[in-house]
Amino acid sequence: MSKKYDRWQKAAVWEALATRRVVVIAGARQSGKTTLAKQITGQNDIFRTLDDAAMLKVAQEDPRGFVKHSRGTMIIDEIQKAPLFLPAIKQQVDENNSPGQFLLTGSANLYSLPEVTESLAGRVSNVRLRPLVTGEILRRKPNFLEMTFKRTWPMQIRGYDKAAVIGMAFRGGYPEALHLSKRRRRAWHADYVRTLLARDLEDIANVRRKNAIADLLEILAAWSGKFMDIAGISRTLPIVKSTLETYINLLEALYLFERVPPWLRTDYERVGRRDKIYATDTGLLAGILKWRLDDVVLDSDRSGKIVETLVFNELSAQAGLGYEYSLSQYRDYKGREVDFIVENDAGEVAGIEVKAGSMVSSDDCKHMVWFKNNVLRDRPFTGVVLYTGENTLPLGKDMYAVPIAALWA
């Protein structure tokens, strides 16, 4: 049985229920949405799951009767199975504008579904729930971004060398898989993918070529941390471009992959405009690619990919807790790159480079130095090289090497 974790987004759900008529907790299947919803449920609340075939049939036959209630909050689990009764919810909350009437969970992005024409704009608050990140597993506060802008990281963090960090990445963040043995975790990830392709995909699209989707899933996992290149991906699959883009959007709608947009507040000629794509769980990434831990530790390309993806998952979880931070990346036509750009609402900027190794030098932040001097100029900037060493070290003016464990320490 999986443990219960105190999710960082719990406070955001409570706050949303106090101010909005409808709250949606959205995220990949098995990321903990139902558990979080049940933790928030009170005695006067009503819980209904559309994973129950009988319940789903009732909802489809009489949507207005299904959503009608006069007390507490109605929690409807897996709303993507019956998106056509969103208009019934809209009618209910338009007749009564009190907050906290509905708490919906969804394993697919509702607004990507062709049947959904009702946005519930002004009535709904969307809360993204990701698989567990290390700080939640260790029951730590999400304070890395605050530390970064204040430059108050711990001076030394021990116990997280390269092998340990990659081992944590292989574990991933799906609660059911966390404490399984390596062999059983790999089997869990394989079953998870099969279930998604056999059942969950049918909730959002009529896909006839499921083998092509399975192949694409593996290709996108291998592309985690790379810039999106539809032409490059299409060369490995016999699928026309329009269908390929549709399939990629479907996998994103299931919250298996996510894009990081380019930083565009500068000269259009100089900046690449392509998104980067990342797997949203490193354990699932390793499982899809059938990687072995010992092999990855010794392979610089694969270890770099999984560690950068781990950092993305940690950063996006913290940046997504409110509206204070935005996350992007930078690359120009000369190949100068910064893995992640974080901006806060005060206009301050942080650049983050990721290294899987335990050695670091000033050369590792040369692109951030260029970015600071030539793009930002007078704006406050902090450059960080996250690495698997133990010590926080200066690398030049406004540049620092920081142990990767500062993300959760």
Image (spheres, helix red, strand yellow):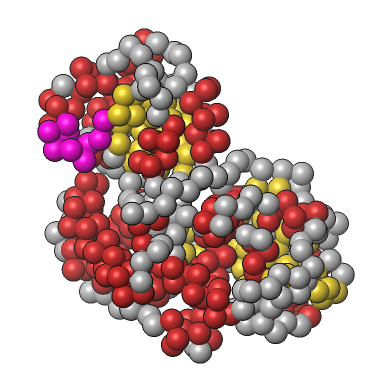
The residue under the point 41% across, 62% down is 178
Point 38% across, 35% down: residue: 38
Residue 397 position, x and y percent, is: 87, 70
* Quarter of the figure with residue 157: bottom right
Q: Is residue 243 visible?
A: no
- State left or right for residue 110 relative to residue 281: left
Residue 353 screen position, x and y as percent: 66, 71
- The magenta region covers 48-56
Foreground residue among 102 and 93: 102
Q: Is residue 32 above or below residue 207?
A: above
* Nearest the eye: 114 or 287: 287
Q: Residue 141 at what x, y percent from top left?
A: 63, 50
Residue 294 horizontal side relative to residue 243, left or right: right
Report x, y in % for residue 36: 42, 40
Q: How many marks?
A: 0
Instruction: Indicate the quadrant containing the N terminus: top left, top right, bottom left or bottom right.
Output: bottom left
Asked if residue 324 is among those painted magenta in the image, a careful observer would answer no
Residue 51 location, quadrant: top left
Is residue 182 in view? yes
Q: Is residue 388 above or below residue 24?
A: below
Q: Which quadrant of the view contains residue 43?
A: top left
Q: Quadrant of the C terminus?
A: bottom right
* In front of the other: 6 or 243: 6
Q: Which residue corresponds to the image point at 51% horizontal and 38% vertical from the top-left?
A: 10
